[in-house]
Amino acid sequence: MGHRPIMYIHGFGSSGASGKVKQLRSILPGTEIHAPSLSHHPIIDLTVLMETVKLNSIQSVVGSSLGGFYALLLACRFRLRLVLINPSLTPWKTLADQIGTHRIFGSGEKFVWSQESIDELLTMRPALIQALCHTKTIGWADVLVLLSRHDERLDPDSTALLLRKATVLWDEEQGHRFDRLDAYADHIRSVVGAPQP
């Protein structure tokens, strides 16, 4: 019998077929992992993610970068366990220089990131502030944050400060993409409620 299903939310320019999904399947054998490929239209994507949580009785979410931002917003509406990997907490700022046409990492499929996308993220800012400032909104004991000391895209110290109520683990070698999760397998299993091997 499988364990409780989880959801993985990829970051900007990635997809539900990312390498992290394969690693999670290895770390969490027998666990159903929902990993929707996002459209890179924030309001549509958040709606899809909410529906995925409701339809599949998701209780644990792993979010990377922009996916970590969405994961926190979902946790405001649903009682979720979270694993946040280099989460982007101000994506309307950090993705402002990405306006234009991009290719999805791995597939090469094109998508457009626009000022409208940035504006949509900004409409979500109040909900994020609510999540971070009101401790009862999110069960911080059920939140694990994996941060790269050498993140070339985000400021990890600011992230650690904003998420100080969570359990924060520092990686001293990896960059923003955080390609290797195996060293944190036990911590991830503990948060999502999967048994240790």
Image: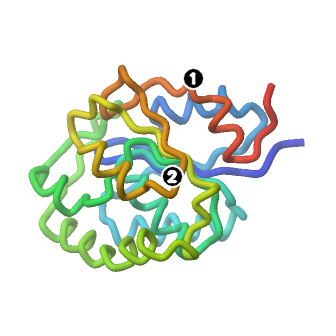
Give the distance between the C-alpha atoms of the residues marked 2 and 1, in whole angstroms: 22 Å
Task: Please tell me whether mark 1 sits on a helix, a strand or a loop.
Answer: helix
Residues 48 and 108: in front is 48
Question: Is 152 above or below relative to 74?
Answer: above
Q: Position of residue 5 (x, y in %)?
A: 72, 51
The label on residue 36 is 2
Q: Quadrant of the N terminus?
A: top right
Q: Residue at x 42, y 73 (%)?
A: 133
Decide which of 65, 130 is in the foreground and name it: 130
Residue 177, located in which quarter of the rendered image? top left
The residue that appears at 70% across and 38% down in the rendered structure is 189
Q: Residue 145, percent across and down?
A: 48, 45
- Residue 197 drawn at (x, y percent): 80, 25
Q: Which residue is mark 1?
A: 182
Instruction: State the SS at label 2.
Output: loop
Q: What amino acid type is highlighted by mark number 2?
A: Pro
